[in-house]
Amino acid sequence: MNGITLLSTGKALPQKCVTNNDMAAIVETSDEWISSRTGISTRYFCQEQEQSWQLAAKAAKEAVEKANISVEEIGLCIVATMSPPFATPSVACLVQRELELPSDTLCFDLNAACTGFVYTLETARALLATNEKPYGLLIGCESLSRIVDFSDRNTCVLFGDGAAAVVVQRSNSQFFAMHGAKGNDKALVCPGYGAEKQYLTMDGKAVFRFAVESIPHCINEILNASSLTLEDIDYIVCHQANRRIIDSVIRQMKAPAEKFYMNLQHYGNTSAASIPLALADMQQQNLLRPGAKLLCVGFGGGFTWGASLVCWKEKE
Ligand code: UT7
């Protein structure tokens, strides 16, 4: 048994929903510009009293309840994030406390920017292969509003906060993964903790170009490795950054648009949380049948990229 399947999801959003018109009151922008250039209509921002780890714990609790498993059976808790509230404790340790996960749970945060959640899938697969316990808790969680420069209209309208969690189980189901990284310290940078100017900066066009090249590359590598075709895949769940990026991939690959799930209109770009948030909405919308083949594709700062082909539950 050296694969994993996805069992359940949970999600949590900050209370405050911010529309494009709300953003136009902060920077010189418009609903028309944001909608037509990105597809985004709303996003959620944490208010002062809201912490991303609280969202992570709430999402995780929901996923564990829906999976109907005991926390004693969870062997690892990995949180993908590039905007943790603390260097230490990790968000994963705070989730462990809130959910009362056993003290032998392997808990850590993983930063691969927007590719973070895809990296957690392969990490969980590898670690569960030798773990005594059958289940892993994988979370994507961001409070990007804390690292975004609200005077920079090139970036602040794009991002949002949120968290989502997935319970995975060690299994014999098909699992294929590919990953990559290429040191780039210019296109998407955030100095972070303690830096005088801690805000995120981005060369949007460079990231766009990278995205529309790397997504088809990731998809094709997984299809080749698994000897499957696009027809065999139920859904392709890309990192939700910009509708135009996904539309461009659909055109390039001459792929059926309905296979590419999108919910970025509601949440904006939530970095490592975007793929699990999509999975959570897909579960809520009853789109996932047991045995469904899901191809998750991430790309982002670093540059990093990666894809995992994973099944939703075991076939009935
Ligand atoms: O998770 C990965 C994270 N990053 C991304 O996914 C970003 C990928 N890149 C993109 O999505 C796009 O490049 C953006 C949405 C960021 C920008 O779209 P674009 O079509 O590449 O626009 P642009 O940067 O070429 O800007 C076009 C114009 C500029 O004005 P001028 O120079 O033509 O007069 C910008 O100043 O739009 C202006 N502009 C805005 N106008 C209104 C830039 N941001 C805004 C804004 N509102 N928020």
Image (cartoon, helix red, strand yellow):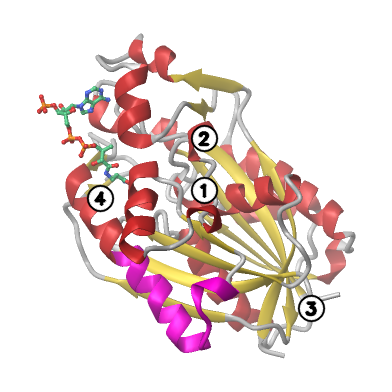
- Which amino acid, by three-letter code, is at mark 1? Ser
| Horizontal side of residue 42 vs 195, given as left or right | right
Measure the alpha-carbon separation of dots 2 and 4: 19 Å
Q: Earlier in the sequence, mark 1 or mark 4?
A: 4
Q: Quadrant of ligand 1?
A: top left
Q: Mark 1: which secondary structure?
A: helix
Q: Is mark 1 within 8 Å of ligand 1?
A: yes
| Residue 39 position in % (x across, y down) | 40, 34
Q: Is mark 4 within 8 Å of ligand 1?
A: yes
- Which amino acid, by three-letter code, is at mark 2? Tyr
- Which amino acid, by three-letter code, is at mark 4? Phe
| Horizontal side of residue 134 vs 300, given as left or right | right
Q: Which residue is the site of mark 1?
A: 274
- Crowding near the residue tagged with mark 4, few <14, some 14–19, many ≥20 C-alpha atoms within 10 Å: some
Measure the alpha-carbon separation of dots 3 and 2: 34 Å
Q: Earlier in the sequence, mark 2 or mark 4?
A: 4
Q: Say above or below: 307 vs 157.
A: below
Q: Which residue is the site of mark 2?
A: 267
| x 72%, y 59%: residue | 288
Which mark is drawn over residue 208?
4
Residues 30 and 92: in front is 30
Q: Which residue is the site of mark 3?
A: 133
Q: Earlier in the sequence, mark 2 or mark 1?
A: 2
Disc 3 to disc 1: CB gap under 8 Å: no
| Residue 176 position in % (x across, y down) | 54, 81
Of tags 3 and 4, the one toward the viewer is 4
Q: Earlier in the sequence, mark 3 or mark 1?
A: 3
Mainly helix, strand or loop, the magenta region? helix
Q: Earlier in the sequence, mark 3 or mark 2?
A: 3
| Residue 237 position in % (x across, y down) | 53, 58
